Image: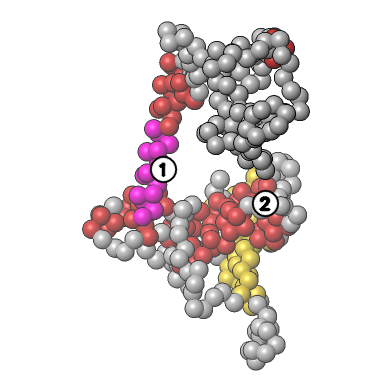
Amino acid sequence: MSADDGTADDGIGDDGTEAGGTPAAGGQDPRAPDPTRAPDPTRAPDPTRAPDPTRAPDPTRAPAPDAAPEPDAAPTPDAASAPDAVPAPDTPLPSAPATGLAALSLPFRVVGALALAAVLVLTGLHLSFLFLHVAPANTVSTRQAKAVNAWIYPEFEQNWKLFAPNPIQQNTTVQARATGLHADGTSFLTGWYDLSARDGAALHGEPLPSHTRQNVLRRAWDLYASSHDDDGRPVGTRGELSAAYLTRLATQRLERAGAGGPGAELTRIRVRARFTPVPPPPWSGEKLAGRPAYRTLDWAEAHR
């Protein structure tokens, strides 16, 4: 007991703690705020005191006026980020413009459909004849041989000797000469025109040379040679057709070359082939024939 105030010294300090800084034995720390006590509105908060993270906020306490967020201006929609406008369900969508045959009027549409149908029919007919020509002999190809040959020869003839074991070892050139009448009525006889050489010269420098022009003369001669014997007599049904085809080609080429001069008329044509062996490589040991060989046909009426 203290002698000054007449009270017993129980070891509890003025701040409610026992000696040594421990809370008094009574349960709660006297320094903790009283939950039943209303906060003093005139008392400013201690800026140095950290908030208690375990303390729940008071739902009845209104926030300070300076803590209220300032009203922001209403956000304006960004045109770039705004979604595309969706048309109303009852708004009809614009139709795509018509293309192709649908863009044409009815008469032109009918003409276009008929032209397309004709092309398809001709293509199917050509492929059918071509198949019967190259296929092994059968009942249909034998029965329709005349129609197939008339369609195929000579323009669409097929040659399946691409992988022949004995390739061609000579150059074949087709030459021709003609007789006829000048514009004044006098007759003439031309020299030999090398038609193959003229075709080759016309192809020099061409970026996309014509395959037909390269091979038409050679194929015409091959067709004639395979359908005639050594004496020039036709063999089979293609003999006369191949001879007429070769003569017509020679006539057209000579007229194009101006044989006989301006205004000349060609009456008779003679064709020959010149065979020149291809020189063998040095390591083969083969011997080369000395001179070119010729095969000259009889005179024939000019065909145009």
The local secondary structure at tag 2 comes to loop
Q: Is residue 158 left or right of residue 265?
A: left
User: Which residue is located at x 70 percent, y 55 percent?
Assistant: 203
The amino acid beneath tag 1 is Thr
The local secondary structure at tag 1 comes to helix
Q: How many marks?
A: 2
Q: Residue furthest left?
A: 139
Residue 221 appears in which quarter of the rendering? bottom right
Q: CA distance from mark 1 to mark 2?
A: 25 Å
Residue 192: x and y, percent?
69, 61
The amino acid beneath tag 2 is Leu
Magenta residues, dominant SS class: helix
Q: Residue furthest bottom?
A: 285
User: Which residue is located at x 61 percent, y 75 percent?
Assistant: 170
Question: For the residue carrying disc 2, how many other residues have a C-alpha within 10 Å: few (<14), some (14-19), or many (20+)?
Answer: few
- Is residue 133 highlighted in magenta? no
Give the answer, above or below, for where 139 lies relative to 290. Answer: above
Residue range corresponding to the magenta coloring: 117-131
Residue 101: x and y, percent?
46, 23
Is residue 85 in view from this perspective?
Answer: no
Give the answer, above or below, for where 264 lies relative to 135. Answer: above
Residue 123: image tag:
1
Q: Which residue is mark 2?
A: 208
Most foreground residue, 166 or 87? 87
Q: Is residue 214 left or right of residue 244?
A: right
Residue 47: x and y, percent?
76, 24
User: Which residue is located at x 37 percent, y 63 percent?
Assistant: 236
Residue 304: x and y, percent?
56, 45
